[in-house]
Amino acid sequence: MSNDDNRKLGSGVVDQGSTAVRAGGRHRPARTARVAAISGGVLAVIGGSVLGSTQLAAASLSEPLPAWSEQSTSERPASAADQPELLAGTALECGANIADLDLAKNVRLDATGDLTTESVRYEGEWSTYSSLPLRAADAAGDDASEQDLNSPTFVWATSDGTVVDIGGWDRYPMYLTHEDTGPEAQEDRTSTCAPEGGDPWLPDGEYEVYPMTVEYSTSTLVAGDPIDATIESGRAHWVPGGQEAPVPFGLPGDPDETLVPERALGSALVDRTGTWERRDTYRVAWPEADLVDGERYELTARCTSSDPDDKVTYELVGEWGDVTGEIPCDGHDITDGPWGYTHPVVPGGPSGVEFTDVPDGVALAYARLGLAG
């Protein structure tokens, strides 16, 4: 498959403007809103990369996204994209240097969890993006008001501070995101600074990625601590791996082979044994007609950690009645549930499982939500 084929969106994908519903039904301001009809509702990928089913490899589940071109960042135009309206009065634009930005000193963005990668399957296509949950904090580290802040985004810079991606700046107040999963910044490895008509993918290399937003009233940029990122073969890596698994076991393979044939709803995994850490969530967006109210689902899971007393916590996403649980990290398989499925109030709403806390010593962990029995 060619790089151009890899980057094609599925059928029925349209631009929906400044707000949209993320894959699985979650509202997010659009970086590039890619929307497809789903059972009378909508499904959108905000800053997501749509992958065909043949692009999911059993070893890594997500095959690396195609890299940009051999064109170096220094050869790209300094301002390939018009400055968004929300950035008027700021120095943030393509080619600017992070050191020259005037950042707020009385408020900042703090991470409230780990950066994770989510993939959603809809009509045979996988949509993938990474996100970081955030909060507004004052100079003392206490919670700050979000009323005057826009929803956050990611700004990418090279190792010398040159901005190569300004992120998405559609107007969407930060406080409104609490109606969904809360504030978070997302990335998709494409660049808003790519020259018109050029290849949009960020090239392989080392980057610093800044969570960033803006105060409406003062047009002052608000940022968080930068995150180191390495892009290799078009895939972004965030945290080094290299941990040893006290109780080695294999993780589930290609989700098209382990989730789809068994009509499972989703899975979550952590793998810190490779060169780079993986923390991925997979969800299958089944047509509403394929799901039955009351049908029983159960969780199968396993975890191993340098501390066998560690526990990974999880929660079910969807209409399950606030189900949470723990996975002991002693290397043994566990089963939890079953629970009865309930159709979401909004058609196309997400259903699945996600990890809520993963201790540092965990080397391998997975959880899978599938039909009971």
Image (cartoon, rainbow, N blue to C red):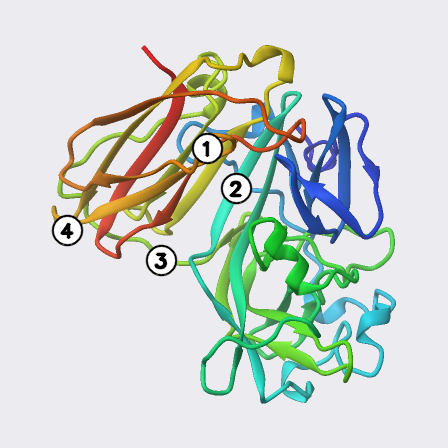
- Which of the two discs, 1 and 4, sits closer to the camera? 4
Secondary element at tag 3: loop
Nearest to N terminus: mark 4 or mark 2: 2
Q: CA distance from mark 3 to mark 4?
A: 17 Å
C-alpha distance separating marks 3 and 1: 18 Å
SS state under label 2:
strand
Are the two marked residues, 3 and 4, in contact with CB atoms closer than 8 angstroms? no
* Measured Cα–Cα span from mark 2 to mark 3: 19 Å
Residue with the mark numbered 1: 61
Point 47% across, 66% down: residue? 111
Total count of labels: 4
Where residue 215 appears, x then y in whole percent?
72, 77
Residue at numbered disc 4: 306
Q: Closer to the camera: disc 3 or disc 4?
A: 4
- Asked whether the residues under the numbered discs 4 and 2 touch, taking CB atoms below 8 Å apart as contact, a structural biologist would say no
The disc placed on residue 240 is 3
**Secondary element type, mark 4:** loop
Numbered disc in front, either 2 or 1: 2
Distance from disc 2 to disc 1, alpha carbons, whole Å, reads 11 Å
- Give the residue drawn at x 39%, y 40%: 315
Mark pair 4, 2: CA separation: 26 Å
What is the distance, in whole Å, between disc 1 and disc 4 at their CAs?
A: 25 Å
Q: Quadrant of the C terminus?
A: top left
Please tell me the numbered disc located at residue 118. 2
Q: Do the CB atoms of the residues marked 1 and 4 lie less than 8 Å apart? A: no
- Quadrant of the drawing holding the N terminus: top right
- Would residue 295 be seen by someone viewing this image from the given angle? yes
| Residue for point 81% across, 71% down | 86
Q: Residues within 10 Å of mark 2 (few under 14, many from 20)?
A: some
Does residue 17 sit above or below 85 in this rendering? above
SS state under label 1? loop
